[in-house]
Amino acid sequence: MKIAITAASGQLGRAIVKALINHPAKPEVIGISRRPDTLKTQPIEFRRGDYMDRPSYLKALQGIDVVLLVSGMDHPSKRIQQHRNVIEASVETGVKKIVYTSIVGNAEDAGFSPVVSSNRQTEQDVRESGLDWSIGRNGLYIEPDIEYVENYIAAGKIANCAGEGKCGYTTRDELGFAYAEMLLNKKHNGQTYNLSGSAITQRELTDLFNTHFGIKLEYEDMTVEAYRSQRQEELGDFLGGIIGGIYEGIRMGFSDVSSDFMQAAGRDHIDWDSFFRHANQKRESI
Ligand SMILES: NC(=O)c1ccc[n+]([C@@H]2O[C@H](COP(=O)([O-])OP(=O)(O)OC[C@H]3O[C@@H](n4cnc5c(N)ncnc54)[C@H](OP(=O)(O)O)[C@@H]3O)[C@@H](O)[C@H]2O)c1
């Protein structure tokens, strides 16, 4: 079976490629990227493909049986057509199945909703493509919090507008494991899964850092408006608005969903104590 992974140069794409390469089924894996040169370090065939450029995907998907479509990073108004370019090229080149990486969240009531809504439209396009399909709705990646820890330590706190809302975080490696199963196993066809670990509040996240990193952080609950403007000042209107909207969504309970990780992956999601213990060991070894 020939499986193509889009955005294979990205962190999620690389995690899915790694899980497939290590899978006992040993599928043939093709990585697609706008910059195929960046894939040269991986032991796979690589091809060029740009979501903006449908003909590039008509070429890249020749001879492919299954496609993993990683959700794009562009403005939500552009994403739907970009994803359609890949879906339509899949149909035209005779791909049999498409697996899409979507996102958990509410499509209407928060600052992050335009992104969620564009993902829901692509889910519908995938379901209506006529191909076999499987969809994962990813929880929030927890790795950016780990990467940000020195900033948290400098500030002495984690401050955002999530309040007491619970968030079903996940990791890219856990997603890679689940997507490998969804790509390889027919029993996942026609299924939409929430892919996340156990849901935690920001205070529980703070406690995990304190327990496993031996540090002393506090959690500060900010208003949605104050947090959004702070993020926009640092990251610009678009990205700052998205980050503000994500935490607003957590506050509103939109990230507190029941997880289908076990159904998708065939095993439990990593627990947060184990993940943080391991993350601190890695930090100390650097
Ligand atoms: N669940 C979460 O917490 C969360 C957080 C952030 C993002 N996301 C979503 O998850 C996706 C993957 O995350 P990640 O961590 O792997 O992001 P990442 O490391 O920043 O990688 C982004 C990938 O998108 C590709 N890409 C961007 N524009 C493209 C285009 N026009 N055509 C083809 N490929 C394009 C890039 O490929 P090139 O090599 O071609 O540049 C790169 O491989 C993101 O795209 C976003 O939709 C989820």
Image (cartoon, grey):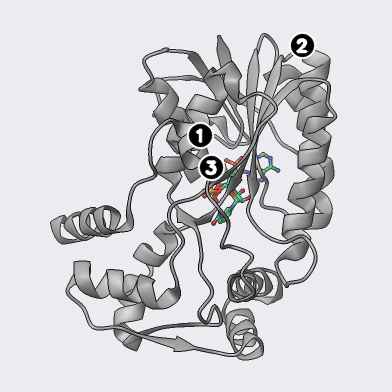
Sooner in the amino-acid sequence: mark 1 or mark 2: 2
Residue at image coords 30%, 75%: 207
Q: CA gap, disc 3 to disc 2?
A: 30 Å
* Whether the residue under disc 3 has CB within 8 Å of ligand 1: no
Residue 75: x and y, percent?
Answer: 76, 58
Residue at image coords 58%, 70%: 250
> Pointer 1 and pointer 3: residues touching (CB < 8 Å)?
yes
Residue at image coords 35%, 87%: 155
Q: Mark 1: which secondary structure?
A: helix
Q: Is residue 171 above or below residue 232?
A: above
Query: Looking at the image, can residue 195 be seen?
Result: yes
Sooner in the amino-acid sequence: mark 3 or mark 2: 2
Q: CA gap, disc 1 to disc 2?
A: 28 Å
Q: CA gap, disc 1 to disc 3?
A: 5 Å
Q: Mark 2: which secondary structure?
A: loop
Q: Please give left or right for residue 107 compared with residue 221 in the image.
A: right
Residue under pointer 3:
260
Which quadrant is the N terminus positioned in? top right
> Pointer 3 and pointer 2: residues touching (CB < 8 Å)?
no
Residue under pointer 2:
94
Q: Mark 3: which secondary structure?
A: loop
The kind of residue on which mark 2 rests is Gly
Residue at image coords 43%, 33%: 177
Residue under pointer 1:
263
The kind of residue on which mark 3 rests is Asp
- Front-most of residues 30 and 25: 25
Q: Residues within 10 Å of mark 2 (few under 14, many from 20)?
A: some
Query: Looking at the image, can residue 46 be seen?
Result: no
Q: Is residue 69 above or below residue 67?
A: below
